[in-house]
Amino acid sequence: LRHVQNSVLQKYCSLCGCLNVDPMHPKTLGLVMILLSRHAQRVEIARNFMVLERCDASLVAWTTAEDLEFLQQKMSSSLDWSVLLGYVTFELTDATRAKLSSDPVLFSLQNSLQQAGITASYTPLEFAMQPFLYMTPAGTPSPKMLERFLSHQSVECRDVEVKCLQAVTSFNDSSNNSALAASCL
């Protein structure tokens, strides 16, 4: 396990080096998530993220950032993302919580998880945000990423593989608006 974690962190640091960003900066993981997401406007979203977070975007190697295939060569496996996202926690202010609780994409994901029988009637916002992150990286199968997320949680459900496929299909069908999904990122 330690070897796997070290390998993933080395890949992450290498990726950050290619992007000319500090891997230890608190906003870097968010930037990397956006740049390696499956959204068509990912670079534009990343630039907006840098402005919103008041980060110096002039240091980012934007030409490299536009080359998704190159970035995916650095880090793209489900295991890599699963290990890296295992470090993510959310600290939400009341204002942010209020805004996200009415977000249509997260609401759709909560409903999809519930309809597939993965969660109960009430799903905490933070719980819904984690699967959204796990399903975001380009080049990774969303049902498998959701299954990996659930394997690290105390979620008990039978036929988890089938239920994950149902949840992702339902979510994709209900939120098939890429601009809406990009706004959630």
Image (spheres, grey):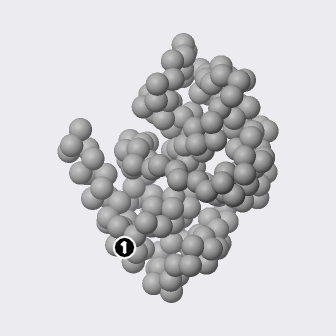
Residue 179 placement (x, y as % from top left): 76, 58
Residue 65 placement (x, y as % from top left): 51, 72
- Residue underneath mark 1: 22
> What secondary structure is found at the residue carrying circle 1?
loop
- Which residue is pictured at 62% across the width and 74% down the height? 52
Identify which residue, 71 or 7, lies in the foreground.
7
Q: Let me know if residue 69 appears in the view.
A: no
Vertical relation: 88 (above or below) 168: below
**Residue type highlighted by circle 1:** Asp
- Which residue is pictured at 42% across the width and 31% down the height? 152
Which residue is most to the front? 94
Label 1: how many Cα within 10 Å (few below 14, some 14–19, many 20+): some
Left or right, 12 with reference to 161: left
Left or right, 54 with reference to 70: right
Residue 106 is drawn in which quadrant?
top right
Residue 169 placement (x, y as % from top left): 69, 32
